[in-house]
Amino acid sequence: MTEKLALKLTAVSKTFGGVRALKGVDFAVRAGEVHCLAGENGCGKSTLIKIVTGVYTPDPGARVEIFGQSGDGMTPAAGRALGVAVIWQDLALFPHMSVAENMAFDDMVGARPRLVQRRKDKIRARAVLNRLGVTLDLDAPLNTLPIAKRQIVAIARALMGEARLVFMDEPTASLTQSETDALLDVVRTLSAEGVAVVFVSHRLAEVLDIAERVTVVRDGTLVGVYPTDGMTQARLGELMTGTSHQQQVTAQDKSAAPPVLETRNLTRHGEFTDISLTVRKGEVVGLTGLIGAGRTELAHAMIGMTQPDGGEILLDSASLRPRSIRDAIRAGIAYVSEDRLSLGLIQPQSIADNTVMSVLDRLLNAAGLIKAPSKQHLVDHWIKEFAVKIGTPDDPVSTLSGGNQQRVVLAKWLATEPRLLILDSPTVGVDVGARAGIFRIVRDLADQGLAILLISDEVTEVMHNADRILHIADGRIIGEHDPRHTDVPALEARIYA
């Protein structure tokens, strides 16, 4: 008996301005299968998805079949009619509309627009949520929901359109472990109902957990299709990058080094309580715990975005009370936000402008104008220092991959010559190869004497890149661990208990 295919691509290529983004890629997904599409940023994953959905037309010679029907001349509307849906990382939902309105939106403005039928839309919406085993307030404005529930709304909207083939782009990037587990259960429900799911994620552990097979693409070329049974994260990372990324514990004993950052009983009501910690010169201290434990809130108090209600911050043994981010920068603190897209960079502006943004005052002449040679020298230095892969410095920073954008963020902050660097989830949306490169930079910076506070909910990140690990839960530090004397399963057991 021939297996039923939801999708079959044969010899798919795509050229942009003489550059081949895809080179003869074959890709097949079975009906009801959870299939991972894996590769580094820029490898061609998004291009492949946009060809399936009719956003791009493949080069001549390609063949696209969706549920046995030809996809020649595919358009987004035709793709939706065949049951194809994409849930992009930004979700593409409407924050001020209700849950029910978001779910019914495609029906109301699709190929055959219709008048709003609130009662019928709510009945259909509730039926779809029941299929997923989820309860939501259909009248709630979307912007009142946490990101995990917005993901569910995006999935439900696809099912309202009777989707049979769903692409999910980095669906868990902003979720806690418990929220991720709940989302993966929803994906399993879809699969059991015969919906094919193509799962795109840089979190390799969940890829191996949820997918039956994984297709790996590198530099626009198909590397292979592999069963996840027996596959390891290390092997998958090697297939994606072409390089072995053996993660090893890099912890060093920095107890003799002088303290750079100290907090004493730092408290902000409702967010964190009695936080006392030390980060020493040249030390990487990992701060880990579930999202919502108070990690980012603590960082915001250290850099003046919020004000603590009690306790003390000391930098190089001197009391510090920053009232703004600018105060923190002047004191010698740099902060890489977890939200690179909205807080770390100004996407439409150039790579050069983003790189010098934090030190513009140092580049002004007596007339208050930017000294072009000084700016150019600084930009060239940091692009070379961090090996940022760019076209030209004048290109918008939005044209860079996630890994290269993060290098620009690091360059922007290192240009301030800080004594303390706070990294808040620095690898969100960054692929495995770029992650390794970023953490090599982090270790090099520590070796040069920079004190670093590394905040992450990924246990493997702090395990392999920190000298000490602090466990925060419910706004309190409840444990300290030496990576040399524990392992990932033991640490995860404590954190996810």
Image (cartoon, rainbow, N blue to C red):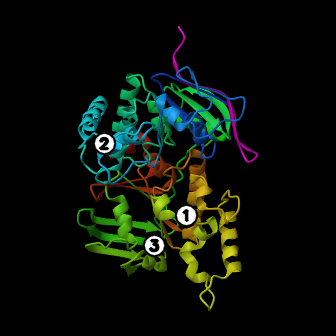
Mark 1 highlights which residue?
409
Do the residues under discs 1 and 2 have CB atoms within 8 angstroms?
no
Res. 383 visible in picture: yes
Q: How many marks?
A: 3
User: Residue 260: which numbered mark, if any?
Assistant: 3
C-alpha distance separating marks 1 and 2: 44 Å
- The foreground one among 31 and 139 is 139
115 w.r.t. 428: above or below: above
> At x 29% / y 36%, what residue is drawn?
125
User: What is the secondary structure assignment of the residue under circle 1?
Assistant: helix
Query: Which of disc 3 and disc 2 is earlier in sequence?
Result: 2
Q: Residue furthest bottom?
A: 366
426 w.r.t. 65: above or below: below
- The foreground one among 473 and 344 is 344
Indicate the amino acid at tag 3.
Answer: Val
Query: Which of disc 1 and disc 3 is earlier in sequence?
Result: 3
Q: Nearer the viewer, mark 3 or mark 1?
A: 1
